[in-house]
Image (tube, grey):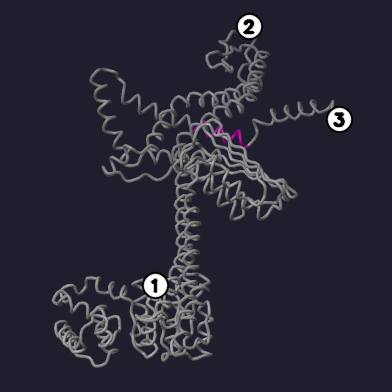
Amino acid sequence: MRVVIAEDAALMRAGLIRLLEDRGHQVPAAVADGDALLAAVAEHRPDVAVVDIRMPPTHTDEGLRAALELRRRHPGTGVLVFSQYIETRYTARLLEGGAAGVGYLLKDRVADVAEFADALARVAAGGTALDPEVVGQLLGAGRHARGLAGLTPREREVLALMAEGRSNAGIAAALVISGGAVEKHVASIFGKLGLPPSEGDNRRVLAVLRYLAS
Amino acid sequence: MAATGPVTSMTALARAALRAPFTRRARDELLFCLAGVLVGLAVLGVVVALLVPGTARSVVRAVAIVAVLLPLALATGMGRRLGAAHRRLAERLLGERVPPPALPRQGALGRLGAGLRDGPSWRALAYTLLKAPIAVAEGYAVFLWAAGLANLTYPFWWGLFRNHPPGVRLSPVLAGTPFPGRVLHISTYPGTFLAFAAGVVMVLAAPWVTRAVVAADRRLLRGLLGPGRLAERVRDLEQTRALAVDDSATLLRQVERDLHDGAQIRLATLAMHLGMAKEKLGDDGDPLDVAGARELVDAAHQNAKDALAELRDLARGIHPPVLDNGLADALATLAAGSAIPVELATDIPVRPTPAIETIAYFCAAELLANAAKHSSASRIGLRATGRGDLLLLSVTDDGGGGADPGGSGLSGLAQRVSTVDGRLEVASPPGGPTRVVVELPLRA
């Protein structure tokens, strides 16, 4: 997997490069601002870009804007936005153009190296990786409290993991249950929420996110 | 030359005195006095109409009328309109520009309540009532002009009307004097010159009397129809409050930035390094890559130490713990840490409030840092003295001078100091030395 990194904190940048190279990935470029990111992606055509939201010059949301621009210019390249805070507004902007090849994770998640690498691989392959915080905010928005109230606690867990973008196998591993059990839960959730059955992880995430964000 | 000095100034004075009655200013002030007399008469008329005749019943009636009229006048904003009219008149005739008072606030009791509690309205009414006694003085000024000018004409018409044959006794003609109760009785032609002389004195004196009366009126105008001292203080406080709010918002933003770019990054990297080390060690059994794991744990260890140092610096930057022991101790710590030798002198008999100590401490810290960075000084003097209700903090250095009081550092300090009604003065001529004095109240 080829990864371009945009992160202005040198320490974190070096750590990410090491983490990725340790796992056999290539990092052809690691830059510190949005413009350099766009240039590096155009030059190296990576599978995925890891983008910090707050970067110079204004230290507000230039990373997010660069990420949106990246999605517009290079729809095939996955974008994993990476930040110390989760902002609902940023989530909405990021998901506006669909959830394929998009990730939004807290920086803290690098602590669980394998999970982080897994999320990055999912985004690179055109999937979705949303931080549990993002999903928590969507679930906590209260717009669908009645619909969600009909779910069992286990089904709510499965729904949250689905919204994070995990596959059935990923959900099964996270909850330590069998793949068959996951399938049963998923079917039940879709039935209770009145969602059309969707094939494939990606379409399923979209259906769930659309439900939560509608 | 020196000998002619007083002489020329005397002639200049005489010339000014002679010219005074003919100036535009004299005319405008006379017109203002005339208007004042009319206003005064009107006010007097209203008061008299309400209170006279003074039978018991009519007094009751008048009081009742006032009790109804006054709130009505205040509620309809008449007080303010009166004030505005007075201000317009003064501006048109005197060029006296009195800033209008701040707009009224809508009270909980609606318009009536707001009107009754509206200070500017009451003050405008007071001014209008005071106009009656002032009008007496203004009337006197008008009288000086009118009677003086009239007196000047006596010698010219005397011959036309008093060409009677000798021996005929006519009643004397009256002429004014500067003293309104006194009159001159003129019965001969030479006597008219006495009237003329009195007229000259009166016309020459009139502009100065007018000016004095108008000056008194101007003071009342400014005092009663302007924004008022309290309102000005409020405006002042609003400004410094805005500065204080900005200042604390800026500080909080800075703290967030420091955390975000510093300790948070270090801790995230620490977690990442430990996560990677964990992978190198494997889930169980023998470690997969001991050397790699050790290296990553080393890196994580360093991250942890750096994060601790950064958090300590940040915490100290928010509130230095040594400040709890008093400003003198805190300044001593600060002085000991300075790159340039600091001569410290403290004499603070009464302990300032914590907010003042904090501001003084951060001023001293910033000023020392400035001196170390820009002045190329070899010695710095730091002095903190309590004097009366004030805390005086001075930082002097023998460096190159040229510190810019408008620069972001010093003006930021001045802003922070002004939030507690303090002052900051900078004297830094090119070539030095630089002396910055911060004056703070002991309690904020």
Camera-side mark, 1 or 2: 1
Which residue is at the front of the view, A48 or B144? A48
Relative to B41, B391 lies left or right: right
- Give coordinates of residue B271: x percent, y percent: 41, 72
Amino acid type at mark 1:
Asp
- C-alpha gap between disc 3 and disc 2: 60 Å
Which residue is at the front of the view, B209 or B38? B209
The residue tagged 3 is: B1
Up/down of A78 relative to B68, above or below: below
Quadrant of the frame with the N terminus of chain B: top right
Which residue is at the front of the view, A123 or B20? A123
Q: Are marks 3 and 2 on the same chain?
A: yes
Relative to A22, A163 lies left or right: left
Amino acid type at mark 3:
Met
Camera-side mark, 1 or 3: 1
Instruction: Name the secondary structure under disc 3.
Output: loop
Q: Give the magenta part as a residue range.
A: B24-35
Instruction: Name the secondary structure under disc 1.
Output: helix
Up/down of B442 relative to B398, above or below: above
Quadrant in the rendering for residue B61: top left
Residue B279 forms part of the magenta stretch: no
- Give coordinates of residue B280: x percent, y percent: 42, 80
Amino acid type at mark 2:
Gly
- Give coordinates of residue B369: x percent, y percent: 61, 52
Give whichever of discs 3 and 2 has the lower sequence position: 3
Per the rendering, the mark at residue B167 is 2
